[in-house]
Image (cartoon, helix red, strand yellow):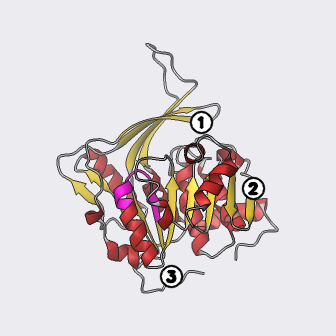
Amino acid sequence: MMDRNSPVSMDVVGVGYTAVDCYGFIPHLPDLNSKLEMTDFGVQGGGPAATAVVTMSRLGLKAAFIGKMGDDLLGELMLKGLREENVNVDCVRIEQGKDSQFAFIMIDSGSAERTILWTRGTLSPLEPSELDEEMIRSSKGLLIDSLEPGAALTAARVAKESGVTVVIDAGTLREGVREILPFCDYIVASELFASQISSGGTVVDALEAMLQYGGEASVVTLGERGCVAMTESGILEIDGFNVRSVDTTGAGDVFHGAFLVGVLHEWDLERVCVFANAVAALKCTRPGGRTGIPDMKSTMDFLGERMPDMSFT
C-alpha cells in the first residue's frame, strides 16, 4: 500500500493535454442547415491527462499536472478546475497571447454516446524543457497521454530511469508515439489505437503488438463492455458494469487514472481492471467528464455490492 506520509512530494504526475469541455444534451444529431434545442448544457474541465489526474486526486492520491494553456478565459477556467480538485498546478505552463484548447460535446440523451468537436487552440507543443523532471523522479507514478508526444517521451524516459511506474493513455497512434512505448510499464489503449497498431487486426493482435514493447501488461478498453488485458501469462477479459449511463464523456480518461491508482495499490491486474471499470462506470452516471468521478469510498461501496467476493484491501 502507498504511504501517504512519505517525503515524496507527489504520488502521481500527469503530463499531457487539458481543455475546457462545453457539453450539450440533444435528442439526436442535427441535420445540416437545421437548428436543435439542447435539453441540458454545462461547462467543465477536460482533456485526457488532466481528467486522469483529477480522478487520481479524488481517489486519494497527491496528484500534479504538467501541461500548457493560454492566458485567456478558458485557461483560467482550466486552472481553477484543477485547483478545486486539489491538483498541484505549480508546473502548468501559461503561454502568453495564445488561445487555449476547447471542445464542444454533443451528447445523445437516449444512448449517452457523444460526438466531440475540438481544437488545440493556438498553443505551441509542450516542450521537454518545460517539464519538472525532479517532480517526476520523486513521484510513484506517471501518466502520459499521446497528445504531447515530445514531452511525453522525455517524461517517460525520466520516470523509467527512476523506477517510477509509467502508464500511457494511448488514444491515437500519432507520430512519435511508438518511440514512447518502450518506456511504458502499462500501455492502456483505445479500440482506435488497437486497430492502428495492429494494422486493422484483432484486439488480441493489438495486445500482442503492444506487449512486444516490453511492458508489464497491455490493455484495450472496450467502453461499456469492459476491457481486455494481456501479460506474458495470458489474457484477461474483464466485463464492464451495467449502470444507468447519462454521459460517456471522459470515461476512458477516468479509467486510465483509476488504473494507475490500482497499480500503485499493488493489486493484481484483474483487480486493477475491475477497479478501473467501476470508477469509469460511476463517472458515466453524471453529466460531463468530471462531475461523476467517484471518491474511493463510493467506489468501494459500489464494488462491495457488485463484486462481494473480490477483496481490495
Residue 237 has which mark? Answer: 2
Q: How far apart, in angstroms, are the residues tagged by discs 3 and 2?
A: 32 Å
Q: Is residue 218 left or right of residue 41?
A: right
Q: Which amino acid does label 1 sit on?
A: Glu
Residue 94 painted magenta: no
Q: Which amino acid does label 3 sit on?
A: Arg
Decide if residue 168 is in sight here: yes
Q: Between disc 3 and disc 1, whose residue precedes?
A: 3
Asked if residue 279 is positioned above or below residue 251 in the image, the reply reads below
Residue at the disc numbered 3: 4
SS for tag 2? strand
Asked if residue 26 is positioned above or below residue 17 in the image, the reply reads above
Tell which of 205 and 83 is nearer to you. 205
Decide if residue 80 is in sight here: no
Residue 113 has which mark? Answer: 1
* Rendered-image quadrant of the C terminus: bottom right
Image spot of residue 261 (x, y percent) = 57, 68
The local crowd at label 3, few if under 14, some if 14 to 19, many if 20 or more residues have their Cα within 10 Å, is: few
**Segment tinted magenta in the rendering:** 143-152
